[in-house]
Image (cartoon, rainbow, N blue to C red):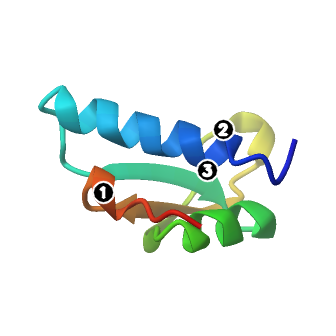
Amino acid sequence: MRGRLIGERLLRATALSLESSGKGNGLHVWVFEANEAARRFYHRLGGEVVGRDLSGIPAAAGSPILQVYWPKADSVRRR
């Protein structure tokens, strides 16, 4: 389903929903550091890496994760 802008639309809709609900402190997502495709996707849409941690998911065995941030809904860029 890549290339159909579904992920972009979902991310933008989520950001707009949070902003319109008054919970508009931006949008944060966590992504596994090893997931290069997802990291490129978020970067293309204007997300900035603002943090790094280790996953608390038992099956992930402490894999590194990155916090990606958009300050406002309109900062989610269109490709």
Q: 32 or 4: which is nearer to us?
A: 4
Q: Which amino acid, by three-letter code, is at mark 2?
A: Ile
Q: Which amino acid, by three-letter code, is at mark 1?
A: Asp
Q: Are marks 1 and 2 in contact (CB under 8 Å)?
A: no
Q: CA distance from mark 1 to mark 2?
A: 31 Å
| Res 57 label | 2
Judged from the image, the secondary structure of the residue bearing numbered disc 1 is: helix
Q: Are marks 2 and 3 in contact (CB under 8 Å)?
A: yes
Q: Are marks 1 and 3 in contact (CB under 8 Å)?
A: no
Residue designated by label 3: 55
Tell me if 36 is positioned left or right of 31 in this view: right
Q: 5 or 43: which is nearer to us?
A: 5
Please tell me which residue is depicted at 78% across the width and 70% down the height of the picture. Answer: 36
Q: 6 or 68: which is nearer to us?
A: 6
Question: In the figure, 2 relative to 58: above or below?
Answer: below
Judged from the image, the secondary structure of the residue bearing numbered disc 3 is: loop
Please tell me which residue is depicted at 12% across the width and 31% down the height of the picture. Answer: 22
Could you tell me residue 13's position as x and y percent? Answer: 44, 35
Q: Quadrant of the C terminus?
A: bottom right
Q: Which amino acid, by three-letter code, is at mark 3?
A: Ser
Q: CA distance from mark 2 to mark 3?
A: 5 Å
> Which is closer to the viewer, label 1 or label 3?
1
